[in-house]
Image (tube, rainbow, N blue to C red):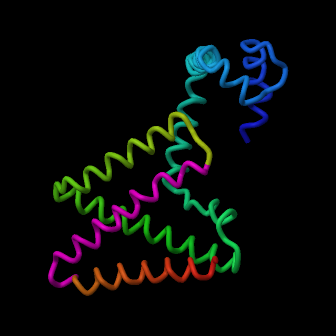
Amino acid sequence: MWQPIWWKDGMPIFSRVTGSAEYSNAIQNAYALPLNSEFAKQARYNIISEPQIYFYNVRRNFVSFNLDTMSFWNKFLVAHNKRLVELLSEFWIISMMVLSAAGVIWGCARNDDSAVTVLTVYMCIVIAHSISFATELYTISKLPLIVLGFALLVIRLESAPRYRALARTIACSMAGLALIISILAA
């Protein structure tokens, strides 16, 4: 997706600044500051000349980051039972995302500092992704915050006497499913 844009728009800037017709990491590193300056100048020009494109991309990146299930990682990490692991992983992460959101929303509604902190850090990551766009590899950065949001839900359920069994059931089920996925994938 980004490569045609790079070769059409980025490489001419790279060549103009470095004097090289070919890209290399060594040349990029040697010319990092002038390249950054020139690419920043071009980015400002692009945003000013057609802001609707930039704002559309920010909105699209915001949505895609939040909905991405990180299934991309299965291509690298799964050795066996690929289809089954893919289905179980998808179910697991979607469940974790929904339960995490419930934990964070519940906590924020009750002015829980832990929930506000998790939400704030998560939103910083989402905003950084939205305005800069990084590849799908970057979406893994939200996983620790999903787990923290999930933990907030379990803790909140555990503190309500009628929901203690539910909290333990949810926690054990998600941990058990994660263990099954790990065993199947190995």
Query: Looking at the image, which residue is at 37% across and 83% down?
Result: 172
Q: Quadrant of the N terminus?
A: top right
The image shows residue 96, relative to residue 144, as above or below, that is below
Measuring from the top left, give residue 116's x and y in whole percent.
25, 51
- Residue 135 versus residue 10 in the image, above or below: below
Q: Is residue 161 magenta?
A: yes
| Residue 20 percent location from the top left of the image | 81, 17
Q: Main secondary structure of the magenta part?
A: helix
Magenta segment includes 137: yes
Residue under the image location 15 percent in, 82 percent down: 161
x and y percentages locating residue 162 in the rendered image = 18, 84
Residue 110 falls in image quadrant: bottom left
Q: Quadrant of the C terminus?
A: bottom right
Quadrant in the rendering for residue 22: top right
Q: Which region shows up in magenta?
A: 136-163
State the count of labels.
Answer: 0
| Residue drawn at point x = 34 percent, y = 85 percent | 169
